[in-house]
Amino acid sequence: MRLNPDEYLEIRRSVNRISDLDKFNLPRGVLHSILIQKKVESVKRKYRIFAEKSDEILKYWKEKGSFPKWLTLTPVMKIRILLKAMGLSAKEIWKALRNPDILDAGLREMVYRAVSTDFVYSPIATKIQLVFGQIGEEIVEEKLRTLGVKFKKEKELKMQKTPDFLLEEPLEFCGRKVVWIESKAIFADYRTYEIYFKKQFKRYLELFGEGIAIFWRGCLEGLDVSDGCEFNGELKRKLLEMEVRIRRDKELEGNPIDIAEKFVESYADQDIFPYNAEVVRILKNMGFLVKQED
């Protein structure tokens, strides 16, 4: 999907939380990616400023048991500043975010709430981005194999800064012959494209020649990329619709965070998932559209 700049700016201004994804009649995955990029840019601007006030944040938490209202970061990034101010190492913070139960009662609930609601920086949010990236690459790989195109994947190329797919012979794609394909499971605005062009695409052009980047969750009009419109199928639908179907019979038992992560890991291959009320809440917090099957 391609958006014109005015439409994109209106969306970007309007989406500030997951519930805002319902404001527009557009694929959920497109809106989700725009929202995440907006949050990431905000955190990058503010994090260092707030990190320098970590002692003040820790003092406030000890007195009030909460964060000051002026600390406008995502839930997990607030927790990171707090735990670091308490003296925890980066490794200890990572463990706490992965398993809040290792913390004392005063922190446990706050950390759990953060990791179950932060759709940008929580471990499960990171897992979602990883899985979506893998799905995008799987779509490309299936298409190339169907066409009988021989290629090497990034991990097979013993070089730095290599594309996801390097083709042995040029392939006609998007009106030109390409020898490499890069898959991105995000939305590309002008700034995002420029970052990746300088960081990756320019180097690929110099080393290998003509290629194409696919931004599965949409892009702005005028960018010299694919928006994935050349592809069809269930995997592409999952990237764009972010729909999870739940069958409600008996409730699945276990750690909700662990179950939610396992659901995400099997998202590409599984169509219907067993029910767990807390897992449903977490998946909705992460941006999924959850539907119940009879």
Image (cartoon, rainbow, N blue to C red):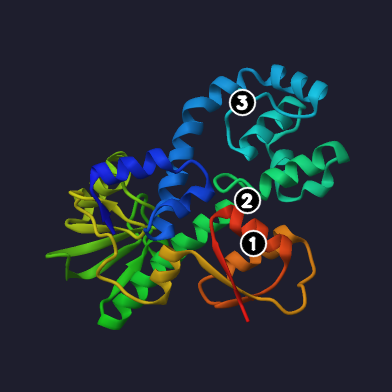
What is the quadrant of residue 209 in the picture?
bottom left
| Coordinates of residue 237 in the picture (x, y in percent) | 40, 70
Tag 2 residue: 123
Residue shown at the point (21%, 58%) measured from the top left: 211
* Spatial separation of the CA atoms under disc 2 and disc 3: 21 Å
Determine which residue is flagged by label 3: 71
Task: Determine whether 134 is above or below 107 in the image.
Answer: below
Residue 197 seen in this snapshot: no
Residue denoted by label 1: 261
Q: Residue furthest right?
A: 105
**Residue 169 on image: x %, y %:** 19, 71
Would you call the spot at circle 2 few (<14 residues within 10 Å), some (14-19), or many (20 or more)? some
Residue 247 in view in this figure: yes
Name the amino acid, label 2: Pro
Q: Earlier in the sequence, mark 1 or mark 2?
A: 2
Mark 1 surroundings: few (<14), some (14-19) or many (≥20) residues within 10 A: many
Q: Of discs 2 and 3, which sits in the foreground?
A: 3
Q: Mark 1–mark 2 contact, CB under 8 Å?
A: yes
The mark closer to the camera, 3 or 1, is 3
